[in-house]
Amino acid sequence: MEKIILCIKGVPKPGTVKVDPVTHTLKRDSLELILNPPDRQAVEMAVRLKENYGLKVTVITMGPPNVIPLLKEVYGIGADEMVLLSDRAFAGADTLATSYVLAEAIKKMSPYSLVLMGLKSIDGETSQVPPETAALLGLPSITNVKTVLKERNNWVVLRQTEYGEEELEVEPPFVASVLPEAFDYLRPPSLKRLLEVKEKDPLVFTAKDLGLSSEKLGLNGSPTQVVDVFEKKFEAKGQVLEGEPSFLVEKLISVLEQKGLIHR
Amino acid sequence: MIDYGLNDTQKLLVDLIKRIGEEYIKPYALEWDEKEVYNERPIKALAQADFFGIIVPKEYGGLGLGSLEMCLAVEHLSYYCAGVSTTYAASFLGAYPIIFFGNQEQKAHYLPRIAKGESLCAFALTEPQAGSDAFGIKTTAKKEGDYYVLNGVKQWITNGGIADIYVVIALTDPSKGARGASAFIVEKGDPGFTVGKKEKKLGLRTSVTTELFFNDCVIPKSRLLAKEGMGFIVALKTLDYARCGAGAQAVGIAQAAMEISLKHASSRIQFGQPVYQFQAVSHTFADMAMKIEASRSLLYSVARFIDRGAKDFSGASSMVKCFATDVAMWVTERAIQMMGGLGYMRDYPVQKYFRDAKCLQIYEGTNEIQRNVIARELLKHYK
C-alpha cells in the first residue's frame, strides 16, 4: 500500500508562553502544547488523500514524550501509524538539525509516495524544514501546495505563487509543504478513533535506533544560535505643542514639514 | 464544583465536544442566530467526530453508548449554541424509533447512515390541531397493496427539509383512535411528500423548523415500523428517552448564561466596587449555581437510571425535562438582569440564551404536560 509520511510539530499554545529572563529559553514546564495550526492543513490533506486513493498515513514528529497526545490527536483525525523521534540529544535543534533527524527517519520508512508538512510553525515561522528535509532526502521540494491529485503513476500538484498558481507534474516520492489556506474546513478527530488510540503507543526511535551522527544533532548540529529572545516594545511618542493659536499653527506646519508630510 | 465521576470515555467525549464547540460554533453562534440561518459546518464536524453514532449500536457502525453520553454531548453542545444542539438532538428523535422498533432490514438500511451522520433524522407527530393532545392527529396512512398512502399535515417539525429520514405517526385505522396509529419511515424525495415554509422563531434560530405535507404520499409497506396500531407506543417511548435531551440542553444553556453574567458582575465596577460585591447580586449567583447543579445532578441520575435498564422512567424523565428547563428559563432571565443594559443588547449572548431557553419549556411536551405525567406517575408509585 502506498504511504504518506505526515510530519507534525507540537508548538506552545499561544498565551501560555513564558521566557526565562536569564537563559532566554522558553520555560517548558509552563507550556501547553498544541498541534501547530498550519500542520492541521497537512493533516487534512493527508486524510483526504487517504480517502480518495487509499493511501496509508504515517504521522511522525520529533520531540519529548509530551508530544504523544498530539500524535494521538492526528491518529484520531485519520492517521494509521504514529512515530515519535525522541532523544535528549535532539534538544535545541534548529531547522537543519531537525531536518537531518526527520530525513534519516523518513529514509527508514521507504517506500513512500510523498511527505506532507505544514508550511511553517507558529513558533519558529521559518518555513525551512520542508525544503531542507527534501534536500537531505534528495527529493523534489514543492512549497505552498494547495491541492494534490494522483494521475496514473504521477502526481499533479497545484501550488500558490506570489502572483498566481503553478501546476506541476511530479514523480513520487516528493516533499510538499501545505498552504495554511489550502482548506477552509478542517475535520475534528473522531471519537471512535480517539477511544481506539487510547491504548496505543507510537513507535519511538532514538538517535541510536536511527544510527545518527551526534555532531549533526541538537545544539551541536545547529548552525543557528539564538542569542537573545525578547518582547518587542512599541511606544507611541506624543508631542505637545503649547502657546498662542497663531504660533501653534506655524509650529505645527513646520513640524509636519520637517517630517516631510507636507510641502509649502 | 461537583465531580460527577465521569469515566474516561465520557471525559474524552466531553473534551471533544467542547473542542467542536470552541472551533466550529462559538465564533459564529450569534451571527447564525441574528441571520436566522442553518449552517452545516458544526453538523458536519459532529458527524465526522462520530457524535451521531453515540446511541447507535456498534453492529450498525455506532458507538453503542447510552443516555448519559447522549446527554453529555447535548449539554456541552448547548453551552455553545442550543440551536445547533436542537438540530443534533432532534435527529435522535428520529433515530430512536428505528433503533427500538426497526426490524433487521430497516436497521441495517438506515442505522449505518445515521451513525455516520450522512443522514439527519426528524420525528413528526405534532399537527396543527394536535399539539399536547397528540392523540388528536388526523394524518392518515391507507394500505393499498404493497404500499401505504399518506395524507395530512405535520407542524413544527425540527429538521424539516434538512433531514433525509422522517419517522411519521399516522392513523392506519381512524376508527380505533389512539390504537389506530402507526409509525412510518418516510424519506426525502418520496412521491407526494413536500416540506412547507421555514418557521420564524423567537429562539433556536439556527435550527430549522417546518411543516411537512403528505399529499397521496406513496411509500412501500416495508417502511412500517413495528406493527400497525403501535404508533403511539413508538412515539411515547421515543419521547420518554428524548426528554432527558431537552433537560441536557437546559443545563448547558443555564451554565453558559451563568458563566458569562458572572464574568461581567465580577468585573463591572459601580459605586466603586464590582457589582458582584453587592449581596443582591452575589446571592443571585449562589441561587443560579445551586439550581444548575441540582438540574445537572437530576439529569445525570436519571440518565444513569435509564442506562441501567430501567423500564418505567416516564416520571423520572419528565422531572428532568420540566425541572431543568424551568431552571434554565429562570437562570437566563436573571443572567440578563445581572448584566443590566448589556444583557439586553444583541451583541451579547445572554439574550439569545433567554430566547433559546423559552422553547425548552414548550417543545417535547410542554412543562404543564410534564407535570401531568409526574402527577399521574405519583399515584401509581404511592398507591
Image (spheres, coloured by chain):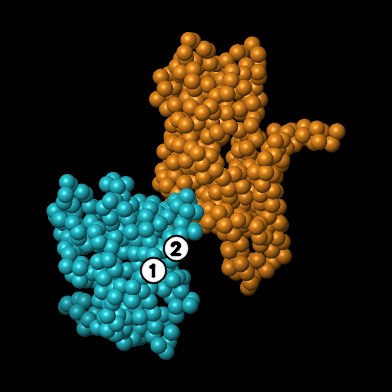
Chain colours: A cyan, B orange
**Closer-to-camera residue (A249/A259):** A259
Figure check: B168 above or below A81? above
Q: Chain of mark 1?
A: A
Q: Position of residue B155 (x, y in %)?
A: 54, 27
Q: Secondary structure at mark 2?
A: loop
Left or right side of A219 for B193: right
Residue farthest to the right, as pictured: B383
Question: Considering depth in this image, is A198 or A140 the residue closer to the camera?
Answer: A198
Q: Which residue is mark 1?
A: A204
Determine contact: label 1, label 2, CB under 8 Å.
yes
Residue at 57% across, 53% down: B10
* Residue at 39% over, 68% down: A204
Q: What is the number of the mark on residue B339?
A: none
**Residue found 62% across the figure and 34% down from its top:** B239
Instruction: Answer with the quarter of the image where residue A43 lies.
Output: bottom left
Q: Nearer the viewer, residue A109 or B298?
A: A109
User: The residue under label 1 is which amino acid type?
Assistant: Val
| Viewport quadrant of the C terminus of chain A | bottom left
Measure the C-alpha gap from mark 1 to mark 2.
9 Å
